[in-house]
């Protein structure tokens, strides 16, 4: 059997979660295989593919501009040497990013499969046209060798060590009342207004839930600060305080999740909890969470001339006019909001 190199060093969490069923299918079908994924997602891969050893981690963060040029060159060359030592006969790139296409060219495989792209002949020896009409899961399926049988996330194994750390961070709050809220996103046009999130947190508290804000990085911290500024009583803020395993543990034990179109949205859906996903100009037919317990909210369809970074109706009403009432009603429909218990009347 030929030696198969599977390239998926994508830095987007949601893309990886959607692709993982296909990546596992290829690993199961090929004994001599090696999977390349982003180093920052080691914990996620370990919980999605427990016991899997055929892994090589792409050092994305070590190649950032915060490192010296010489260190970046040395780290990249060390990775390429490790990849070439596998001596792949075939490489498959189902994402088609510039970095994965470049790795395909450098891996040494005689047969290099990937999606069409500019100057694609230089990167791949065989280009396959993906199915761009449906969900991104189907796009990956059309390039996988073979594809996963059903459009679902992989189950995530428990991590007992992370469970204890999360309980400590919650400071005595009951896990089963937590409503995880992610107010950030990679793009500004994906973000619901902070005042709306603040109002949602207040309503959730009155309904017996414990809002917990999550995030990572400067952009999420700034958005959380804006949300907190609209609140009389601050909400529990775990931004930059959770490892990926701890975030998974928090989600697995929470009552529900509300957030913008983002990687944590897909992670929450993969954890099997009810999810309310707030969509604006991005296409939910391509990116909606793959879960029966997930609901997508949008106020109205985008105009024909709208683009993600250019709203012809001004201020993205598709997203910003979603109301707190709509979110609360959806949480109620999903069974997230606890029902008030009937009180016995003593006579």
Image: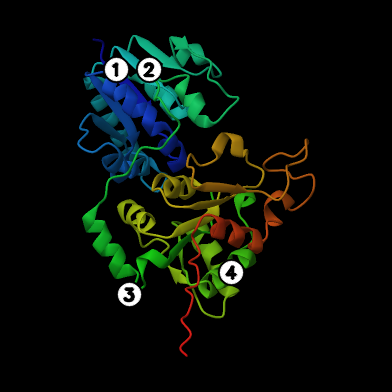
Query: Label 4: which residue?
Result: 198
Q: Name the colouring of the figure.
A: rainbow
Q: Quadrant of residue 156?
A: top left
- Callout 1–callout 3 Cβ contact below 8 Å: no
Q: Bin the neighbour count of mark 4 within 10 Å (Cα to Cα): few under 14, some 14-19, many 20 and up.
A: many
- In the visual, does 231 lie left or right of 166? right
Residue 329 locus on image (x, y percent): 61, 60
**Cα–Cα span, label 1 and label 2:** 10 Å
Residue placed under numbered mark 1 in the picture = 4
Residue with the most extreme front position? 347
- In terms of depth relative to the viewer, which is nearer, 88 or 197? 197
N-terminal of the two: label 1 or label 3? 1
For the question of whether residue 226 can be seen, the reply is no
Q: How much space separates mark 1 and mark 3, taking CA atoms?
A: 48 Å
For the residues bearing labels 1 and 2, Cβ distance under 8 angstroms: yes
Residue named by callout 2: 145
- In the rendering, at what x and y percent does residue 270 appear? 41, 44
Left or right: residue 127 versus residue 193 is left
Q: Give the side of residue 237 with respect to residue 207, left or right.
A: left
Q: Which residue is mark 3?
A: 172
Q: Secondary structure at mark 4?
A: helix
Among the two numbered marks 4 and 1 on one chain, the one whose residue lies closer to the N terminus? 1
CA gap between label 3 and label 2 equals 47 Å
Of pointers 3 and 2, the one earlier in the residue sequence: 2
Vertical side of 347 occupied by 308: above or below: above
Q: Which mark lies nearer to you, 3 or 2?
A: 3
At mark 1, the secondary structure is strand
Secondary structure of the residue carrying numbered label 3: loop
Estimate the spatial distance between the alpha carbons at disc 2 and disc 4, rounded to whole Å.
46 Å
Mark 4 vs mark 1, CA separation in Å:
49 Å
């Amino acid at each position: 059997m030929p030696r198969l190199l599977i390239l998926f060093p994508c830095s987007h969490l949601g893309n990886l979660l959607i692709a993982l069923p296909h990546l596992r299918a290829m690993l199961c079908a090929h004994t001599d295989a090696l999977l390349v994924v982003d180093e920052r997602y080691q914990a996620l891969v370990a919980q999605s593919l427990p016991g899997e050893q055929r892994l090589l981690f792409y050092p994305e963060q070590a190649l950032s501009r915060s490192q010296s040029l010489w260190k970046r060159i040395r780290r990249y060359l060390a990775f390429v040497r490790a990849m070439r030592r596998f001596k792949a006969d075939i490489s498959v790139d189902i994402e088609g990013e510039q970095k994965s296409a470049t790795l395909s060219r450098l891996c040494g495989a005689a047969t290099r499969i990937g999606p069409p792209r500019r100057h694609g002949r230089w990167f791949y020896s065989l280009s396959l046209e993906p199915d761009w009409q449906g969900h991104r899961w189907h796009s990956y399926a059309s390039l996988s060798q073979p594809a996963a049988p059903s459009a679902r996330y992989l189950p995530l194994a428990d991590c007992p060590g992370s469970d204890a750390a999360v309980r400590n961070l919650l400071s005595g709050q009951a896990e089963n009342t937590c409503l995880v809220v992610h107010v950030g996103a990679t793009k500004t046009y994906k973000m619901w207004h902070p005042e709306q999130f603040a109002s949602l947190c207040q309503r959730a508290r009155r309904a017996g839930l414990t809002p917990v804000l999550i995030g990572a990085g400067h952009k999420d911290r700034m958005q959380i600060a804006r949300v907190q500024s609209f609140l009389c009583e601050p909400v529990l803020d775990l931004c930059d305080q959770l490892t990926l395993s701890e975030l998974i543990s928090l989600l697995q034990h929470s009552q529900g999740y509300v957030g913008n179109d983002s990687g944590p949205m897909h992670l929450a859906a993969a954890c099997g909890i009810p999810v309310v996903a707030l969509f604006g100009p991005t296409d939910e037919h391509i990116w909606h969470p793959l879960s029966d317990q997930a609901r997508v909210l949008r106020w109205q369809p985008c105009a024909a001339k709208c683009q993600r970074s250019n709203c012809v109706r001004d201020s993205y009403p598709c997203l910003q006019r979603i109301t707190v009432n709509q979110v609360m009603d959806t949480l109620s429909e999903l069974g997230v909001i606890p029902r008030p218990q009937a009180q016995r009347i003593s006579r």
